[in-house]
């Protein structure tokens, strides 16, 4: 049995030199860098519309349309993020570097997809649909925070120029 040591253990950097080179050369890095803040902007607008409907009862159709748009942008960032991950890490998803972020991204994707399914199936009360959307949005915020914290930690640890890919979900 190895003896415990007080020396710090070596932590794997966010990217190896080869992964960083692939990341820096991939056009998908730019796509992710554009889609991540776009998705966040769409989220903020949609959240405002949803909260407006909850507060006033007005604008349900607009709030619903904004949730659908948010979900479509989520799908776009998930598909392109998977391509990015394949190019950089050799896996479509669940590369060790972003494993837990990808796991939580699946929850985000499932909740957004459940919203679309419930919307199109009909029979759900507007408040139930909005509650489902808000659950999806809460999961999205947690997931976005995961990516932002991971990339911030990487920058602080000296893994400079980490991409904005992080806010994928």
Image (cartoon, rainbow, N blue to C red):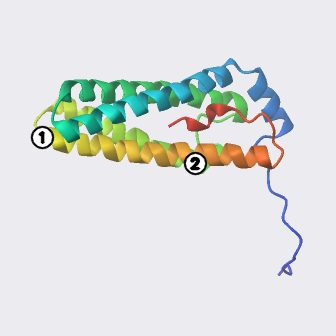
The quadrant holding residue 128 is top left
Q: Is residue 62 left or right of residue 140?
A: left
Please tell me which residue is depicted at 59% across the width and 22% down the height of the picture: 34
Q: Tell me the SS state at disc 1.
A: loop
Q: Is residue 59 left or right of residue 95?
A: left
The reply to whether residue 25 is in sight is yes
Image quadrant occupied by the N terminus: bottom right
Q: Position of residue 35 (x, y in %)?
A: 54, 24
Residue, disc 2: 146
Depth check: give the residue in front, 141 or 76.
141
Please tell me which residue is depicted at 82% across the width and 40% down the height of the picture: 16
Considering only order in the chain, which callout, 1 or 2, is on the residue closer to the N terminus?
Answer: 1
The quadrant holding residue 69 is top left
76 vs 85: above or below? above
Disc on res. 106: none
Q: Position of residue 70 (x, y in %)?
A: 39, 28
Residue furthest to the top in view is: 27
Residue, disc 1: 125
Q: Position of residue 48 (x, y in %)?
A: 34, 34
Circles 2 and 1: CB atoms closer than 8 Å: no
Please tell me which residue is depicted at 89% across the width and 71% down the height of the picture: 7
Q: Is residue 128 left or right of residue 81?
A: left
């Amino acid at each position: 049995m190895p003896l415990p040591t007080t020396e710090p253990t070596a932590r794997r950097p966010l990217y190896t030199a080869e992964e960083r080179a692939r990341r820096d050369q991939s056009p998908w890095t730019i796509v992710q860098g554009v889609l991540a803040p776009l998705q966040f902007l769409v989220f903020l607008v949609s959240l405002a519309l949803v909260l407006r409907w909850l507060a006033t009862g007005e604008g349900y159709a607009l709030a619903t349309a904004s949730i659908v748009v948010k979900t479509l942008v989520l799908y776009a960032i998930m598909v392109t993020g998977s391509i990015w991950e394949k190019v950089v890490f050799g896996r479509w998803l669940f590369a060790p570097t972003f494993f837990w972020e990808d796991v939580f991204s699946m929850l985000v994707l499932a909740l957004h997809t459940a919203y679309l399914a419930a919307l199109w199936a009909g029979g759900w009360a507007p408040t139930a649909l909005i509650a489902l959307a808000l659950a999806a949005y809460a999961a999205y915020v947690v997931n976005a925070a995961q990516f932002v914290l991971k990339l911030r930690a990487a920058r602080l640890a000296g893994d400079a120029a980490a991409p904005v890919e992080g806010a994928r979900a």
